[in-house]
Amino acid sequence: MEQLNIIYHELTDKVNTGFTRYLLPKINWNARLIAITGPRGVGKTTLMLQKIKIENKIDESLYVSLDNIYFSNHTLFELAGYFYRYGGRHLFIDEVHKYETWSQEIKNIYDSFPDLQIVFSGSSILDVYKGFGDLSRRVVPYHLNGLSFREYLIFETGQDTEVYSLDQILSQKVKIKLENPLIHFKKYLNHGYYPFYKDNDFMIRLTGTVNAVLEVDIPKYLDLKVSTIDKLKHLLQIISESVPFKPNYSKIADLIGVSRNSLPDYLAYLEKAGLILELTNETKGIRRLGKVNKVYLNNPNLAYMLSGEHANIGNIRETFFFNQLKLNHKVFSSETVDFKVEGNEFEIGGKSKGNKQISKLSNAYIVKDDIEYGFGNTIPLWHFGLLY
């Protein structure tokens, strides 16, 4: 316990609170049981440590990671009881998916210590979702995305930029004082989605993150051979180089060497783990099942990591648009253009993209890369990075 406390104080001393994520003020911190999920590497640990430091409740709080060797011969429930008896009131638990009985023990802690707040997070949303069954009536869940382009700009320039609604963006109301936004935008697409992007070994670390998802997280649920994992990696690379990727389940199943019936589960796990996005049509009810029209990587950084200069720029543009809107909006495929969002239709392209494709549509927009300013129904692509 003493060693855990030392680690906790060292981490809170070092964490910087100058920049905080969009999710921090959105969480109901009065709730007794809070879950923070999200893909590996998006900043869940930092968010929890920042909350402790900002509230200045260091002595009443404790942060622990369940991958610590301490938990090889101590239980989480035992730790919580000790902490509570000595005045602890806020327990922050990280990496819950690495502790086999986390769900049951957190439930027992919740029921046994009524004045103790529990905040937990998991780098792999696969395990966290599985455990929600026992906690569903008690837990208040939140999901953390990677950095928006707006957050990246704050991180890079120190200049605060307001959040714009989709309606404001479509009405050409974006007004920010920023020199060379397109230069920042290109850098963001390449490496700005993950908060650890300033690390010198960013691409190596991102590669390790992807490998951990494929080699550790997903195999917990699917009986995969090593050769199948390698083929999933190859599938991700194919997605990054496509224009964009339109899934043919039979062909993919043959490529990976699995049954066609198993493939939707594989893709579902890849999406929950934060590696891909599946774009469906707007068909409601049971007909929507299996109607995946396109598959994208989760964010443009993954495309550059997997394919480098071979990454398809059209795919990257669409991936960025989908990724930034999906947090607060339902995004669907369209029969005539690239995306449909709440009655609006969007065609994504470069600065030379014409209006012909949307000429007969109402509430339709051309979203162009490589332009700084919009006009009429032409919107700069980077503006959609200001949504959160």
Image (cartoon, rainbow, N blue to C red):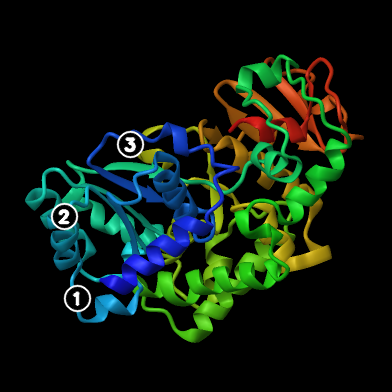
Circles 1 and 2, Cβ within 8 Å, touching? The answer is no
Q: Which quadrant of the figure has residue 251?
A: bottom right
**Does residue 350 appear anywhere in the picture?**
no
Label 3, label 1: how far apart the Cα atoms are: 28 Å
Residue farthest toward the left in the current orientation of the protein:
112
Label 1, label 2: how far apart the Cα atoms are: 16 Å
- Secondary element type, mark 3: loop
Is residue 16 found left or right of 349 in the rendered image?
left
Residue farthest toward the right in the current orientation of the protein:
352
Q: Which amino acid type is shown beneath numbered disc 2?
A: Tyr
* Residue at x-position 84% and y-position 25%: 356
- For label 1, the crowd category at 10 Å Cα-Cα, with few meaning under 14, some 14 to 19 and many 20 or more, is few
Is residue 27 found left or right of 60 in the rendered image?
right
Q: Nearer the viewer, mark 2 or mark 3?
A: 2
Q: Which quadrant of the figure has residue 376?
A: top right
x, y percent for residue 95: 37, 64
- For label 2, the crowd category at 10 Å Cα-Cα, with few meaning under 14, some 14 to 19 and many 20 or more, is some
Is residue 52 found left or right of 308 in the rendered image?
left
Q: Which residue is mark 3?
A: 29
- Secondary element type, mark 1: loop
Q: Nearer the viewer, mark 1 or mark 2?
A: 2
**Does residue 322 appear anywhere in the picture?**
yes
Is residue 64 found left or right of 46 in the rendered image?
left
On residue 74, the disc is 1
Q: Which amino acid type is shown beneath numbered disc 3?
A: Trp
User: Is 173 above or below relative to 51?
Assistant: above
Circles 2 and 3, Cβ within 8 Å, touching? The answer is no
User: Is 331 above or below relative to 101?
Assistant: above
Q: Which quadrant of the figure has residue 231?
A: bottom right
Q: Which of the two discs, 3 and 1, labels the residue nearer the N terminus?
A: 3
On residue 84, the disc is 2
